[in-house]
Image (cartoon, helix red, strand yellow):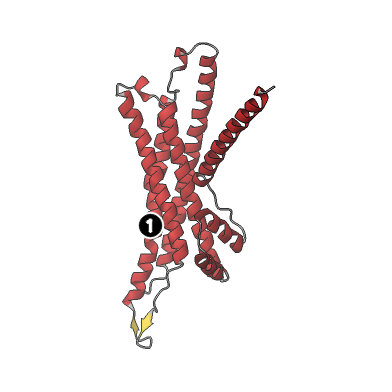
């Protein structure tokens, strides 16, 4: 009977360790794949503050800005940008994981297994880092607020103000950058990932080298996983094209404010 307390203590300790590890993994995944819920402006601001650990001053500024129609629209726009960039970040991390463990182009092509696999994995990691930088850039733009434009005319309205048009063009740069990233970088990357996964989808250990039933189970799971990731990439590529068009429309709408 003396051994029972020791056994229970050991089981409890292992359970606590496993639970702590699971909690840390869940927290990491939640932070890496987060999506800010869009709703009432104050609810959105509270969600942003919780995700980015915004201080009280910035939170108060955002709430004051949300009281105006233009400010609320600006917060909603930047929230969409943050969500879209965070989705790209998660998607490219998923693709990097897939290339590392579920894609083997070396079985079809005469390239070095290690070099080819890690090249595509590294490319997706770099894209994920770029998407992460876009998340931070959108968050900083959200805190900075809409850029205040100088007056169109000066000297009592007799002359145009060159600084006004320069400020308008500066405001359009972020939209132009976003449109270029979505159309020329993220969209092709998703299509390329889908094609590579289609051509080389295979678990890191070929199923035919495993004994039955592990070969059957691994083969089915690997095929299902790569098919889902491939379909996900195609869907994200289509959405990236839509996002590029939206960013281009926003850029054009900014240029409509030019004093010509």
Q: In the rendered image, which quarter contains the N terminus?
A: top right
Q: Is residue 182 visible?
A: no
Residue 161 vertical position relative to residue 6 in the rendered view, above or below = below
Circle 1 crowding by C-alpha within 10 Å: few under 14, some 14–19, many from 20: some
Give whichever of 165, 202 is nearer the camera. Answer: 202
Give whichever of 255, 55 is nearer the camera. Answer: 55
Residue at the far front: name it: 2
Residue 189 vertical position relative to residue 143 in the rendered view, above or below = above
Picture coordinates of residue 192, whole percent (x, y) = 39, 35
Q: In the rendered image, which quarter contains the C terminus?
A: bottom left
Picture coordinates of residue 238, whole percent (x, y) = 48, 43
Residue at the far right: name it: 1
Residue at the far top: name it: 211
Tally of numbered tags: 1
The answer to whether 253 appears left or right of 44 in the picture is left
The answer to whether 60 appears left or right of 154 in the picture is right
Q: Which residue in the protein does label 1 denote?
A: 176
Residue 159 vertical position relative to residue 252 in the rendered view, above or below = below
Picture coordinates of residue 258, whole percent (x, y) = 38, 71
The answer to whether 28 appears left or right of 106 in the picture is right
Residue drawn at x 54%, y 58% is 49
Residue drawn at x 44%, y 25% is 201
Picture coordinates of residue 61, whole percent (x, y) = 51, 69
Residue at the far bottom: name it: 156
Q: Is residue 88 visible?
A: yes
């Amino acid at each position: 009977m003396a051994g029972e307390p020791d056994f229970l203590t050991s089981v409890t300790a292992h359970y606590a360790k496993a639970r702590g590890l699971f909690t840390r993994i869940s927290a990491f995944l939640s932070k890496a794949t987060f999506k800010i819920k869009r709703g009432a402006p104050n609810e959105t601001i509270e969600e942003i503050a919780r995700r980015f650990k915004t201080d009280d001053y910035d939170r108060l500024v955002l709430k004051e800005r949300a009281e105006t129609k233009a400010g609320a629209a600006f917060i909603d726009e930047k929230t969409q940008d943050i969500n879209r960039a965070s989705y790209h970040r998660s998607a490219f991390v998923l693709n990097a994981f897939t290339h590392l463990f579920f894609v083997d182009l070396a079985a079809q092509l005469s390239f070095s297994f290690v070099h080819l696999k890690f090249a595509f994995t590294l490319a997706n990691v770099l894209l994920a880092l770029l998407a992460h930088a876009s998340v931070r850039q959108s968050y900083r733009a959200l805190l900075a607020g809409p850029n205040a434009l100088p007056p169109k005319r000066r000297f009592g309205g007799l002359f145009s103000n060159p600084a006004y048009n320069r400020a308008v063009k500066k405001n359009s740069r972020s939209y132009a950058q976003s449109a270029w990233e979505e159309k020329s970088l993220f969209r092709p990357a998703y299509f390329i990932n889908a094609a590579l996964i289609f051509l080389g989808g295979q678990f890191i250990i070929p199923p035919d080298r495993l004994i039955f039933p592990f070969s059957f189970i691994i083969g089915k799971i690997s095929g299902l996983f790569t098919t889902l990731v491939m379909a996900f990439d195609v869907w994200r590529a289509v959405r990236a094209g839509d996002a590029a068009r939206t960013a281009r429309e926003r850029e054009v709408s900014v240029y409509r404010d030019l004093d010509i």
